[in-house]
Image (spheres, rainbow, N blue to C red):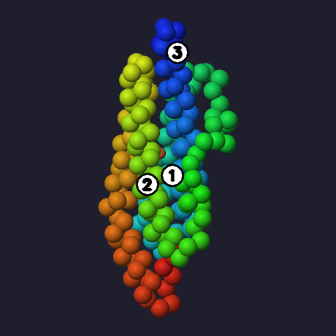
Amino acid sequence: MQSAQTGNDARVERLIEWLRDAHAMEAQAESMLSRQAERIEHYPELKARIEQHIRETQNQAKLVESCLRRHDASYSGIKDLGGKMMAMGQAMGGMMMGDEIVKGAQMGYVFENLEIASYEILIAAAEAVGDLETKKVCEQILVEEEAMAAWLREHLPKITQDHLTRLATPGVEAKR
Ligand SMILES: [Fe+2]
């Protein structure tokens, strides 16, 4: 990047750190969503939407990686993956409760909003350092995160009510 040579180093380094965080976040998202989708048995609409977002998430990880590679041709995501992700993963991992379908959709909504905030930050940072390709990529990813967040928000009432209906029906599993 030209800006890396022209006195913007500290700012570009910060942008790169945030891209690495986003890359780790997407890897975390993929594993959480996969675990979630695998476990769903009785809520096909939610399962299908999650599966769609898994494909989007895999592509997002590649897009973020392409931004990192433009700054550092030898970039390898491997060292990011051990990392930095928050307790959200654990929260979604511990799905032993009887309302896991509702809790999963709830945490999914929270996580999408975390992603939305991350890309808003990246867009602003990329703009500030003149990395317009990264800005464009992040804007493209943001659209998908917003669509997933909106879908989850819109469907939370129905998921909740379906869960309660199943709960009240003898011999029917409500949990997942
Ligand atoms: Fe994502």
Give residue 70's position: percent from left, percent from top: 53, 22
State whether residue 66 appears in this view. no
- Marks 1 & 2, CB-CB < 8 Å contact: no
The CA distance from mark 3 to mark 1 is 34 Å
For image coordinates 42% across by 37% down, the residue present is 119
Give residue 165's position: percent from left, percent from top: 39, 82
The kind of residue on which mark 1 rests is Ile
Toward the viewer: 18 or 50? 18
- Marks 2 & 3, CB-CB < 8 Å contact: no
The kind of residue on which mark 2 rests is Val
The CA distance from mark 1 to mark 2 is 16 Å
Give residue 89's position: percent from left, percent from top: 57, 54
Q: Secondary structure at mark 1?
A: helix
Q: Which mark is residue 110?
A: 2
- First in sequence: mark 3 vs mark 1: 3
Look at mark 1 in the image and give the residue it sits on: 54
Q: Where 79 falls versus 163 (above or below)?
A: above
- First in sequence: mark 2 vs mark 3: 3
Q: Secondary structure at mark 2?
A: helix
State whether residue 29 appears in this view. yes
The kind of residue on which mark 3 rests is Asp
Q: Is mark 3 within 8 Å of ligand 1?
A: no
The CA distance from mark 2 to mark 3 is 33 Å
Look at mark 3 in the image and give the residue it sits on: 9
Q: Residue furthest bottom?
A: 170
